[in-house]
Image (cartoon, coloured by chain):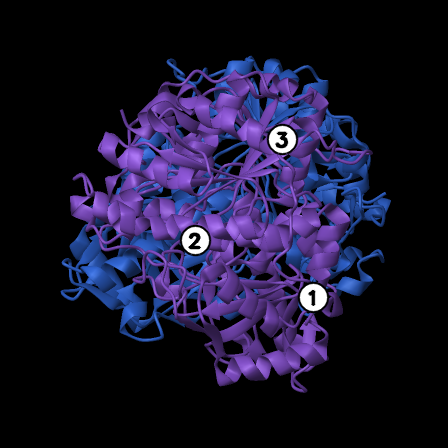
Chain colours: A blue, B purple
Amino acid sequence: MTDLEIAQAAKLEPISKIASLIGLSDDDIEPYGKYKAKINPIDFNEAIPASHKLVLVTSINPTPAGEGKSTVLVGLGDALTQLNHKTIIAMREPSMGPVMGMKGGATGGGYSQVVPMEDINLHFTGDMHALTSANNTLAALIDNYLLHDNQLDIDPRRIIWKRVLDINDRALRQIVTGMGGVSQGVVRQTGFEITAASELMAILCLATDLSDLKRRISNIVIGYNTDKQPVTVGQLHFEDAITILLKEALKPNLVQTLGHTPTIIHGGPFANIAHGCNSVLATKTALNLADYTVTEAGFGADLGAEKFLDIKRPILGKTPDTVVVVATVRALKYNGGQPLEQLENENLVALENGFANLQRHLDNMNRYQIPVVVSINHFTSDTKAELDLLKSYCERQGIEAVVTDSWANGGSGTIALAHQVVTATQQPNKFTPLYNSEESLTDKLTTIVTDVYGGSEVTLSKKAQRQLQQFADFGWQGLPVCIAKTQYSFSDDPHLLGAPTDFTIHIREFIPKIGAGFIVALAGNILTMPGLPKKPAALNMHIDADGKVTGLF
Amino acid sequence: MTDLEIAQAAKLEPISKIASLIGLSDDDIEPYGKYKAKINPIDFNEAIPASHKLVLVTSINPTPAGEGKSTVLVGLGDALTQLNHKTIIAMREPSMGPVMGMKGGATGGGYSQVVPMEDINLHFTGDMHALTSANNTLAALIDNYLLHDNQLDIDPRRIIWKRVLDINDRALRQIVTGMGGVSQGVVRQTGFEITAASELMAILCLATDLSDLKRRISNIVIGYNTDKQPVTVGQLHFEDAITILLKEALKPNLVQTLGHTPTIIHGGPFANIAHGCNSVLATKTALNLADYTVTEAGFGADLGAEKFLDIKRPILGKTPDTVVVVATVRALKYNGGQPLEQLENENLVALENGFANLQRHLDNMNRYQIPVVVSINHFTSDTKAELDLLKSYCERQGIEAVVTDSWANGGSGTIALAHQVVTATQQPNKFTPLYNSEESLTDKLTTIVTDVYGGSEVTLSKKAQRQLQQFADFGWQGLPVCIAKTQYSFSDDPHLLGAPTDFTIHIREFIPKIGAGFIVALAGNILTMPGLPKKPAALNMHIDADGKVTGLF
């Protein structure tokens, strides 16, 4: 059975029943269909109880072999539920762009899925669309201001606010707008990004409430005036209209797993081009309502977990009690040099070579001094010798590695991991941040590159150097850095697998995201608007007269 | 009190209660919040009973003075409900673009409103966003096909499929995409339209079910190959993916009026650049469930009603039993030459001059041989002399004119009109179509221009002439014509008010909408992407920390 078929065959509980499991009444939620709801703002008067545990699921660097991080996440949530722990899963909303491009959703797989998966992977409750609307309304207001007014002397060549669509559309990466004569606007070169890369997405995910959302929107720097000084949304007085467009999207979404674990899905920035974590509001809500909150961060621990710990954690005000690093035999063999088409074959040498990738991620988590558990996500092609080698390797690091069978057996296949996680969360947490906010942007960058990525140094383009000077003048030095980098390697070269050393990370440009509250550093050729492949997944999809969909995943 | 304040103060019934009023159970609907729902597909095995009446509300040409067509529509629905007639209002979804541009929503006004009006005027149930996504996914798939494949030899210069946003953004009217080198795509000049102008919007509004939706999407002509032959979505095999993106949007949306009349809001094409009617599916659903279905068509009767009767009616399979033409003393005086800033002053001469506009709309409806009622929508500045003059004028035409007070008094202010409408629907309906589908496109155009607009002739640009020749070769002659024209005048010049004669309508270009099943004829300088004004309405909007919105309308 395909993931979609398993999901379509599932018997779901009414969403009000799921809400009641975590103490939410019908007045606390707004239903969106029978199996989805938005959670209305809740006043949590007290601090999150210390007994409420936060578990962060991350992984080794992703490979074409597949790691199944979301599948383990969902399986772990269901396993904790089976062990009678009050559990909420908090995860990100899928982007529709990749759904049409590459076969595969973002709601787990097999018997560890969040449902209704079709809805969640398509329009869901409209958050992505609200963000697209808000982002592009702001862009239209800016271009309109240029045409009619421009009292602030915005330089059309220095506008950094781009338009977005939740679509993989490379033809929109670089465009010229405002053509057709004087009355059509001001001609300028600009482009579209994918909605997940919008600063508004980051803001939605980091805002602690509606007032904070509006404050952050006001702080967005949309470009520079002819004196090269930053111009904000607040100076243009557009913050209220944009906030109004996002007021419903700010409410976290409640769904369920196949095992009926309440799941909050909210916010979906990519971890390669943004900070890669679901919303602070969703995670906070979960932490208040559940004994165990199981959440994830995008891509590998070098991107997602680093950004969770250095960007999201200070705002969330809660450090993970345990980090789960997901690895697979297949992906480690791929990292160890075995070609994709030979991953079905046992190869202990490649596996051993690939350990280096897992090792560096474990070292990094140890550096933050958070208890770590390794989840070996089982594939049918894994041999006993491979699994034993991997487990003994982890044992030598003093880390318990647990084989999980989340895809085939859901929560039941993840019980051992759940036990291990419960134990780990009881350990003392001596969290140590990677850097302090007072350090310079260069120092923060260097720390991430040398201490997390394992590189030797950071180089900056002329433009990036000039920008750093300006940012110091604008008072932006105290912000965290969000490196936009390939997810496939610790380096900025997607082909350097395993645990490369002696590499340089080259920053070609910085993008200030002052509303979100971080500085994006573009490393390598990272694109903020994906393209479609030659045979897009859209071609496999079918729908019959009754609305039954096949070929979606 | 503002419209928004009245709407916010209203006590709404739960949507399941509203559904039960028209015989729909909780299984028949999908709630979207507590006061909105989508109606699941219903099998209506029998034909619409002849006793179920359809009332079409239209108006004179719109003016800056305001006519209040939606307000009368809602008031009429509430009045029929008060008279214990089982009534459903069927209307269009507002476009968000104008909401940010020009203060004013599209859900009626005063005490004749549909609620929750804030939601309906913003993201509602996401139909507009689904259309935007589907439209732009198709565009991305086409550009991707050009880059990777193009076995069909599509000519990049002859692609007519544009991208859309539900935003007024003139800077996107004419753009160049695919810049940045070989790997970014094929450079070409294109543009964005507003979502309401998308062919997919027209298709959603004319499709009779999901299969018909897919069939129509397959038939969309996206452009021409290098042999100048049309290329369809079906040839590219994208129809299933696009249909999947629209499967929820195809379900009509249920809300309520302040008087708790069930209201189906679904589909929102503009009547100046598209066919201007809510969906066939929504109207059919209403006709099946209610004794009286009250619906509207966009702008004046020259655009909206003509397109309702010539494009929507043949697919709907039901002719309106009565047409209500809404007029105001103010708007007629404006049509009669009185300047906007003097409309508060009595002016019987201007009123008499302005009659000509109403007269021509009444003549047109008589031409279709449908019973007509005139609604004089009351404004406080109207004098008794003016109202008496207007009523006696209508009497001379053998038409009953009823003064309505829908804004101030809701359904109670519209009771007299309701009585008149009930009587009119009992009259024999000898509907006569304006043209037959077998006539040539030129003949259809000429008939609309001479018989409905009152013009003398149609002229075609060289390009339009060439297109007509090609369309005949492609077998498109049998389709109806949808003229894209200014709403302010019977002519294509927005400044020719009243009832101009001896004018020519110049068609600069045709746009084939083969999926929708009509040919758009662009008259005058009509734009398919609006712009924002110097002081956009967005600047008036405010939202407080509790999410309370002011200044929206």
In the displayed structure, would residue A346 be above or below residue B225? Answer: above
Q: Earlier in the sequence, mark 1 or mark 3?
A: 1
Q: Which residue is mark 1?
A: B233
Instruction: Identify the secondary structure beneath mark 1.
Output: helix
In the displayed structure, would residue A55 be above or below residue A344? Answer: above
* Same-subunit check for callouts 2 and 1: yes
**Residue B246 in the image, given as x and y percentages of width and height:** 64, 48
Residue B47: which quarter of the image?
A: top right
**Which subunit holds the residue at mark 1?**
B
Q: Measure the C-alpha gap from mark 1 to mark 3.
A: 45 Å
Q: Nearer the viewer, residue B459 or B99?
A: B459
Q: Are marks 2 and 1 in contact (CB under 8 Å)?
A: no
Please indicate, yes or no, whether residue A454 appears anywhere in the rendered image: no
- The answer to whether residue B189 is left or right of residue A162 is right
Q: Earlier in the sequence, mark 3 or mark 2?
A: 2
Q: Which mark is residue B426?
A: 3
Q: Measure the C-alpha gap from mark 2 to mark 1.
A: 41 Å
Q: Which residue is mark 2?
A: B360
**Which subunit holds the residue at mark 2?**
B
Dot 1 alpha-carbon crowd within 10 angstroms: few under 14, some 14 to 19, many 20 or more: many
Dot 3 alpha-carbon crowd within 10 angstroms: few under 14, some 14 to 19, many 20 or more: few
* Identity of the residue drawn at 33% across and 71% down: A461
Q: Amino acid at mark 2?
A: Arg
**Which subunit holds the residue at mark 3?**
B
**Residue B68 in the image, given as x and y percentages of width and height:** 37, 38
**Residue A59 in the image, given as x and y percentages of width and height:** 61, 45
Q: Amino acid at mark 1?
A: Val
The N terminus of chain A lies in quadrant: top right
